[in-house]
Amino acid sequence: MGCCSASIQLASLFILPGILSLKTIQLGFCSVDHNVGCIDIERKALLKLKQGLIDPSDRLSSWVGEDCCKWSGVGCNNITRRVNMLDLCNRYGYVDEATDHAFGGEINPSLLVLKDLVYLDLSMNNFGGVQLPSFIGSLEKLKYLNLSSTSFGGIIPLNLGNLSGLLYLDLGNDFGHPIETNLQWLATLSSLKYLNLEGVNLAKTTSYWLPTGSIPKSIENLTSLEEFDLAWNQMSGIIPESLGELLSLVSLDIYGNTWEGAIIEAHFAKLGGLRRVSIENNLSPNICLVFNISSDWIPPFKLRSLYIRSCQLGPKFPTRLRNQTELTTVALNNARISNTILDWFLQLDLQLDYLDVSYNQLSGTVPNSLRFSFYSVVDLSSNRYEGPFPL
């Protein structure tokens, strides 16, 4: 996910196809009264943190003087003067200069002195594969934790489950080293709204991991979850029906794994707010996940993005899409669909940014009534079309 701006409000980003909407979650960060200094014990704790960090571009040059509330990346409550925000994100992101500005070294346990810390962002830095500090699980007031692209390694501490007040957790975008964990620790994070575990490589089988390497049934406890990203983790096993208990879910990304079994109506019947679904068995040459849903079932949601790859939807073109009138992204790639694109789909009058129906056995002529936006991507390859190709 990368850095997020944090000044007075905690902003959690929900990315939907073609739309970037911003939902703010009030945390009560207060503007700083520059006439009052910060708590001395917290100032000293921050200096210990600075001493442990490798700072090649001197990003912490402002960390001098008595008032740590004026330091770059530090936020305080203007009544208690306690530090409640620490934003050390490397905002150079993925550009060439990013490495020159990335923090390294170690995260000093002096962070535990910051008892009122609710916001911690260490993203886009490079900690060289060292163990993710377990004491982070003791920062029990945290509501926002972003450790994406930090190159931590080792084991995700199970005591992250102690952070029951978390609203936002981002561990994704490649830690750089294999991560071992058991997702059962997520069960206590019932307030969580945003969860990104993309590319964390959760598949490694150890004593810390479930035998199947799959999603635990206890995921149903995350009833506040709106965005759930488990992409590119080489996970396997059956997708539990308990996923259908995430009643607040807006976006589901579980592509780049090797799922088995069946998707049935119970997986989606209660998810009325769902807007984005992405399921892909990218790492398996065989199709082992089947959509076993009645052809006359009417989904309770209106999707904007549907991305299904290497899963069996066919042989018929899926009639479950009949009421999906808000789609802008449709990918039904390698889905074993063997008939034509039916008239009712064309009559939805969608304007698509992305259409991929490649690697099926679609027949007939290429329809000339599909509408696309100016920069659309269209892939109709590896099918059995015949006749003229429409302009």
Image: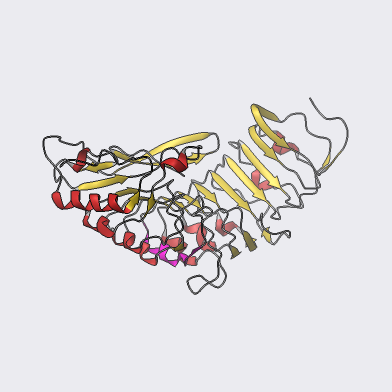
Horizontal side of 334 relative to 256 (left or right) equals right
Residue at the limit of the structure toward the left, as seen here: 35
Q: Residue furthest right?
A: 387
Q: Choose between 374 and 86: the one closer to the eye.
A: 86
- x 52%, y 39%: residue: 16
Residue at x-position 65% and y-position 41%: 330
Number of marks in the image?
0
- Residue displayed at 41% across by 65% down: 185
- Judging depth in this view, the residue of 310 and 47 nearest the camera is 47
* Residue 276 counted in the magenta span: no
Q: Is residue 63 above or below residue 110?
A: above
Range covered by the magenta-colored residues? 179-190
Would residue 248 be seen by someone viewing this image from the given angle? Answer: no
Give residue 127's position: percent from left, percent from top.
42, 53
**Residue 192 picture location, percent across and down:** 38, 53
Q: Residue furthest front?
A: 56
Q: x, y percentage for residue 104?
A: 39, 51
Q: Looking at this view, is 261 or 109 the one in front? A: 109
| Residue placed furthest toward the bottom | 207
Q: Is residue 129 above or below residue 124?
A: below
